[in-house]
């Protein structure tokens, strides 16, 4: 692997002739699976966050590791950018083709390759979505717990190091990916990790590629851990007079080490949005915690009783229970749709979802300061969060036709990042860096960014892999 | 010996008695826990502050002198083997626990702090540090990070990488870096994971923030006997397959139980071909339920006897044999060689059967003591280095076990690292594209190659020499390299 970094590769768009030649080759090799229509390119130009579209020149739908490798080899030879695409649900502009080039859409690589029930793991192609995987696991007694709001692909979840409501108990993608197949910038197919539960052979390439956002390699297969479906699952909802008491309930619970499986906060604005969007009945638009307990009958009862006690001490209501599967899934569906519910609060708006994560002991301070900031600015911005991990999202709604409104939203988001970092936390708990958080990364990580830059250069010397994302290649 | 000018520059940045170069002073550092390989370093440096570490690295980097970081020296793969022309940078004097935050459940510690000392200090808050390698009395937390150490409890609680929040370290150039974060996630590439298991090749660690776990209210242990090793292996797969993740799941075969019984008198059933230890922890309700489930699975897997610890004393007695297994085996054989491969659990019966067959073939006894729940094997091959040919046969036997681990989808080292011991096996496990990624990462951190050279990642040339080179698409890679 060459270590000399091509400085011109801190990137201009490739020339029209270069792109035309490459598109010609792709059309010859992939026929209808290489698409240049405007509609398809537009669809692949942005994720679910800010629109700010940037269109690729062509979208290719490979069906195998070898095809992905062949596409990347062509791009590497022609020095043309290549952006991997799952289902486009990322929030930080990860998939925008800032410099044009080839979008590799992995949606046709959507097979579950193997399920090893005895070893509690499975291997899937990158285009398998989390809901598809759990549907295919039906009947095995196993499930895959990581659940970002969107029905994302496993490849995309791995590339962005996604998390979800279950992370407090089951961890994030970081803890649950056992191995990967990755196509490198040179178009080689590399296998990392594997089915062994632990390995200390070589550097941890698996975790390096988890969260690489398509900038170090394209993930084509993912080996993940599975878990036995717990014997008993109980969900409960508890409403609070104010945000502070709800947050302090969470902090107390975490400090006591109650092994709660999910603990989600929705503030009054978000709860209002969810009640309307998901037709939840019997709840008030007040700060609310959703809980879920996993274990045996006696263990879940014990955990829930203890949790109720703590909540009551902080002024929480009596728990409303959901133990039937349909009731629970209605509740969590409402939670997963929180982002869409927030968007529906004001028709025509766009949203900025911040993604701060702080040490649990600072969660109340951080949330209350943030709430006050939003009120001062007179914005509509629901708060929703995986609060057991100290991770929360402020969904800033703004009018895309009013630059001042967008600027106000960006300023608040900026202050959330700074506040989280000041409190010993991070500006991105799970959504990643993409294009929007590059500055925050430098602020937060200082010297380590230099190392990240060197890793990027070592593994992708011509900067063809998702250029302009994740790590700022020039200083300042 | 280092040249005099360099020696005086290094001693000038160190406190008195922290620069050792007399042969009698450097001899204790000539190997780590893998005593098969020895080398005398040019000097041993014992800094006490991060500023001293920075100064040492700047001097060595400028003078192009290799630096081998060293913790407690308990490593089993030769990761701390000195370099004849270099210095050993010992972190032994970085031995302070800097703070414990019981609310955030973290502790900030220096790298030379012993693994067990963290749990001892955290006990006052009802907390402990979960990863527990067998050497936890002696091994240091910095070494644990460098090797990504495991232990009995890592099945449920994860490896070192899952239990560390933040690492501060110094690059070979003397630049200070921090990886990770006090919060759940850190943005950008996962450098924290990269430094775990990096065997001192990427940075010298100076400070670590570890996660602490609340002590479970109750722990109980089940001891199950089997009349057949394969059945015991199948029982392990059955427990995990039933969705149970015990706090510990360990296996010992008859040769191991007999050796320890003479040593610690744990009361193991000596007629059994294999013994499983299954630990459950949590609230009394959870433990009672899990123990019942485990017992049911063990019975249907053909256990001939099941004992459940009645109290803490008996639980510790059950474990005493497992913890003392290595020294106990040391009593019955002049030498032993500990193998460290990991396999998918479902392959346990097959691999154990082959090891037994090869044991007969090579005429070398083999005791099996291992983290069965993780599929992490530790076959101990018993031999006598003084008998001609036995050491060679032992190594051949060991290599064959590791090759089998790769064949069934596993890895050549579960937790002991590559060091100098397994460089050759690395060529078998990884193709040149993977190795090229490793070398690219090394060059991003340490383009000079001065940090712990010759360890962990083989050069492409080495793999070419031993013929383990992966031929891709029929093209011989690096055709310009000299081959032998």
Image (tube, coloured by chain):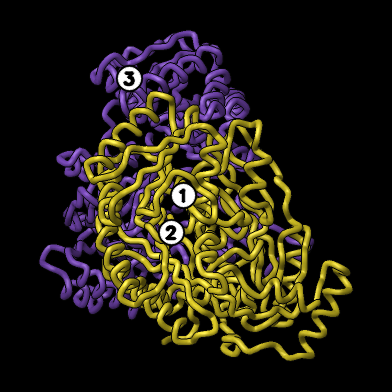
What colour do you see for chain B?
A: purple
What colour do you see for chain A?
A: yellow
Classify mark 1: helix, strand or loop. Answer: loop
Tell me if I can see residue B413 in this picture: no
Q: Is residue B144 above or below residue A217?
A: above
Count residues near mark 2 (Cα–Cα under 10 Å), then give few for <14, some for 14-19, many for 20+.
many
Assess whether mark 1 and mark 2 are in contact (beta carbons under 8 angstroms): no
Tell me which numbered mark, 2 or 1, is placed earlier along the sequence: 1
Count residues near mark 1 (Cα–Cα under 10 Å), then give few for <14, some for 14-19, many for 20+.
many
Assess whether mark 1 and mark 3 are in contact (beta carbons under 8 angstroms): no
Q: Are marks 3 and 1 on the same chain?
A: no
Classify mark 3: helix, strand or loop. Answer: helix
Residue B360: horizontal and vertical position, in percent?
A: 58, 23
Q: Pointer 3: what residue?
A: B318
Q: Between tags 3 and 2, which lies in front?
A: 2
Residue A426: horizontal and vertical position, in percent?
A: 36, 66
Residue A367: horizontal and vertical position, in percent?
A: 31, 62
Q: Is residue A439 above or below residue A68?
A: below
**On the rendered structure, is A29 left or right of B447?**
right
**On the rendered structure, is A185 left or right of A407?**
right
Q: Nearer the viewer, residue B149 or B283?
A: B283
Q: Are marks 3 and 2 on the same chain?
A: no
Q: Pointer 1: what residue?
A: A165
Q: Pointer 2: what residue?
A: A270
């Amino acid at each position: 692997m060459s270590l000399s970094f091509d400085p011109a590769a801190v990137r201009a768009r490739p020339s029209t002739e270069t792109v035309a030649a490459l598109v010609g080759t792709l059309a010859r090799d992939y026929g209808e699976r290489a698409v240049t229509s405007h509609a398809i390119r537009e669809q692949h130009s942005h994720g679910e966050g800010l629109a700010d579209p940037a269109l690729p020149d062509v979208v290719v739908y490979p069906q195998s590791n070898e095809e992905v490798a062949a596409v990347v080899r062509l791009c590497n030879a022609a020095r043309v950018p290549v952006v991997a695409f799952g289902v486009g649900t990322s929030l930080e502009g990860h998939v925008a083709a800032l410099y044009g080039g080839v979008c590799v859409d992995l949606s046709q690589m959507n097979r579950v390759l193997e399920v090893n029930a005895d070893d509690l793991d499975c291997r899937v192609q990158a285009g398998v979505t989390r809901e598809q995987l759990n549907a295919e696991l039906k009947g095995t007694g196993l499930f895959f717990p990581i659940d970002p709001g969107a029905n994302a692909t496993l490849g995309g979840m791995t590339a962005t190091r996604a998390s979800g409501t279950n992370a407090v108990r089951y961890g994030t993608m970081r803890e649950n990916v056992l191995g990967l197949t990755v196509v490198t910038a040179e178009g080689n197919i590399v296998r990392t990790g594997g089915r062994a539960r632990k390995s200390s052979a070589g550097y941890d390439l698996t975790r390096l590629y988890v969260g690489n956002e398509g900038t170090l390699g394209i993930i084509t297969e993912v080996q993940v851990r599975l878990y036995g479906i717990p014997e008993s699952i109980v969900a409960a909802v508890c409403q609070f007079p104010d945000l502070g008491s709800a947050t302090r309930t969470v902090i107390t619970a975490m400090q006591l080490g109650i092994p709660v499986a999910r603990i989600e906060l929705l503030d009054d604005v978000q709860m209002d949005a969810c009640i309307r969007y998901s037709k939840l009945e019997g709840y008030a638009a007040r700060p609310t915690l959703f809980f879920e307990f996993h274990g045996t009958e006696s263990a879940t009862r014990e955990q829930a009783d203890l949790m109720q006690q703590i909540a009551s001490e902080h002024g929480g209501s009596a728990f409303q229970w959901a133990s039937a599967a349909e009731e629970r899934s209605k509740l969590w569906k409402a939670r997963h749709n929180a982002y869409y519910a927030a968007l529906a609060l004001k028709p025509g708006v766009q949203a900025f979802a911040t993604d701060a994560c702080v040490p649990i002991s600072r969660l109340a301070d951080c949330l209350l300061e943030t709430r006050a900031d939003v009120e001062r600015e007179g914005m509509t911005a629901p708060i929703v969060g995986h609060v057991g991990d100290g991770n929360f999202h402020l969904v800033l709604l703004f009018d895309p036709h009013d630059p001042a409104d967008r600027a106000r939203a960006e300023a608040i988001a900026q202050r959330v990042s700074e506040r989280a970092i000041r409190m010993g936390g991070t500006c991105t708990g799970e959504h990643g860096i993409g294009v929007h958080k590059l500055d925050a990364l430098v602020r937060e990580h200082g010297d380590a960014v230099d190392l990240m830059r060197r890793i990027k250069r070592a593994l992708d010397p011509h900067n063809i892999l998702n250029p302009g994302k994740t790590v700022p290649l020039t200083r300042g | 010996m280092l040249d005099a000018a360099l020696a005086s520059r290094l001693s000038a940045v160190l406190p008195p008695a922290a620069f050792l170069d007399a042969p009698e002073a450097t001899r204790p550092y000539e190997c780590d826990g893998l005593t098969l390989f020895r080398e005398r370093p040019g000097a041993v440096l014992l800094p006490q502050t991060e500023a001293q570490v920075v100064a040492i690295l700047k001097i060595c980097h400028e003078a192009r002198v290799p630096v081998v970081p060293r913790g407690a020296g308990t490593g089993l793969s030769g990761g701390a083997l000195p370099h004849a022309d270099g210095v050993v940078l010992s972190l032994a004097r970085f031995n302070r626990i800097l703070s414990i935050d019981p609310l955030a459940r973290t502790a900030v510690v220096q790298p030379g702090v012993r693994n067990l000392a963290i749990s001892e200090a955290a006990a006052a808050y009802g907390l402990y540090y979960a990863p527990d390698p067998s050497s936890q009395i002696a091994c240091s937390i910095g070494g644990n990070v460098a090797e990504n150490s495991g232990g009995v409890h890592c099945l449920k609680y994860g490896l070192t990488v899952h239990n560390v929040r933040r690492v501060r370290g110094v690059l070979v150039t003397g630049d200070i870096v921090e990886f990770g974060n006090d919060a759940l996630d850190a943005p950008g590439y996962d450098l924290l994971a990269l430094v775990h298991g990096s065997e001192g090749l990427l940075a010298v660690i100076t400070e670590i923030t570890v996660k602490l776990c609340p002590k479970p209210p109750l722990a109980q242990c089940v001891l199950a006997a089997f009349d057949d090793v394969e059945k015991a292996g199948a029982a392990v797969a059955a427990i995990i397959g039933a969705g149970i993740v015990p706090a510990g799941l360990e296996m010992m075969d008859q040769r191991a139980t007999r050796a320890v019984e003479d040593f610690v008198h744990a009361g193991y059933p000596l007629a059994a071909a294999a013994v499983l230890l299954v630990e459950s922890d949590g609230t009394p309700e959870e433990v009672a339920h899990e123990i019942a489930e485990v017992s049911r699975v063990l019975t249907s897997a053909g256990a001939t006897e099941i004992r459940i610890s009645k109290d803490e004393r008996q639980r510790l007695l059950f474990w005493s044999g497992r913890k003392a297994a290595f020294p106990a085996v040391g009593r019955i054989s002049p030498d032993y060689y500990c193998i460290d491969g990991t396999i998918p659990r479902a392959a346990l019966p097959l691999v154990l059967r082959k090891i037994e067959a090869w044991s007969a073939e090579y005429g070398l006894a083999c005791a099996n003591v291992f983290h069965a729940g993780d599929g992490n094997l530790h076959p101990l091959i018993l031999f006598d280095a003084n008998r001609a040919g036995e050491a060679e046969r032992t190594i051949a036997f060991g290599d064959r076990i590791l090759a089998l681990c790769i064949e069934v989808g596993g890895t050549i080292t579960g937790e002991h690292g590559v060091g100098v011991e397994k460089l050759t096996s690395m060529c078998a496990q990884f193709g040149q594209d993977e190795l090229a990624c490793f070398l690219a990462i090394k060059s991003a951190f340490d383009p000079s190659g001065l940090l712990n050279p010759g360890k962990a990642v083989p050069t492409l040339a080495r793999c070419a020499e031993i013929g383990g080179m992966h031929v891709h698409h029929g093209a011989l890679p690096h055709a310009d390299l000299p081959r032998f």
